Image (cartoon, rainbow, N blue to C red):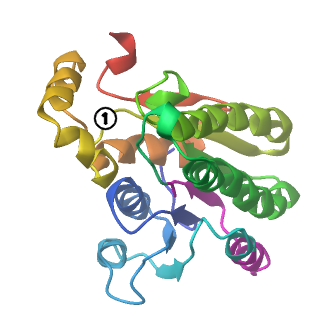
Amino acid sequence: MFDLSGELAVVTGARRGIGLAIAAALAEAGADIIGISAHLEPAGSEVERRVRATGREFEGMRVDFGDRAAVLACAGELACRSRPPSIVINNAGTIERAPAVEHSLDLWDRVVNVNLSAQFAFTQTLARPMLERGRGKIVFLASLLSFQGGINVPGYTAAKSGIAGLTRALANEWAAHGVNVNAIAPGYIATDNTRALRDDPARASAISDRIPAGRWGEPADLGGTAVFLASPASDYVSGAVIPVDGGWLGR
């Protein structure tokens, strides 16, 4: 049920952190990987090494999700291939921290574009061949802030709340056509995006004290849920936003 042999997965934001961990997990389950990132090395990247170590194929592409034309060009080229992706993991993203009253509109526009608008544009294009074939798996990376308000991240919260809604909207339209759309909502994961929180003793302690699991998550903690949502095991799961948060939302 969890075998991905013969599948081709595209993972955005694959150079490091959660994207790297998910790409490696999908490869271990049998999928070939197309890794996309704004700063992905042409050859010899960590994600390439991890994927090839499993015996699976890897292709890297450098695409800035802040550049809509580049996003559409990449998605269009992948969708027209003789072997288009059967799995899409939408992990690319960015975050900007500033109190709402000081959060510039330029920061707002960039965060919402990268984390929401570009995700829709990329997915819309790659979904077309999936819908024609009658099968496919699409997984968005949502956030705890798809459910909560957060502090000093109004653009990020708005975008990730939008991702939860977009997941449900696409699932409503595409589930009957064999394309499953779901999302993972990571908790507090030790990545570059959360370094500012971990470097703040007061915030780091307050967060750690609330997590029932007693620790921050690691990127690898997302791998199993990603494999589940990309595999036949989740064929009757559609429109779900699954927290992987050490129990944070249940506290």
Question: Which segment did they paint magenta?
Answer: 73-93
- At 78% from the left edge and 45% from the top edge, which residue is drawn? 178
Of residues 246 and 191, the one drawn nearer to the viewer in this rendering: 191
132 up-or-down from 179: above or below: below
Horizontal placement of 125 versus 191: left or right?
A: right
Image position, residue 69 (x, y; %): 74, 74
- At 36% from the left edge and 72% from the top edge, which residue is drawn? 51
- Magenta stretch: residue 233 in it? no
Q: Badge 1 is on which residue?
A: 188
Of residues 149 and 162, the one drawn nearer to the viewer in this rendering: 149
| Count of residue discs | 1
Horizontal placement of 173 versus 163: left or right?
A: right
Q: Is residue 184 visible?
A: no
Q: Quadrant of residue 248?
A: top left
- Magenta stretch: residue 82 in it? yes
Of residues 178 and 159, the one drawn nearer to the viewer in this rendering: 159
Horizontal placement of 217 versus 124: left or right?
A: left
Image position, residue 159 (x, y; %): 60, 40
Image position, residue 234 (x, y; %): 58, 37
Q: Residues within 10 Å of mark 1 (few under 14, many from 20)?
A: many
Secondary element type, mark 1:
loop
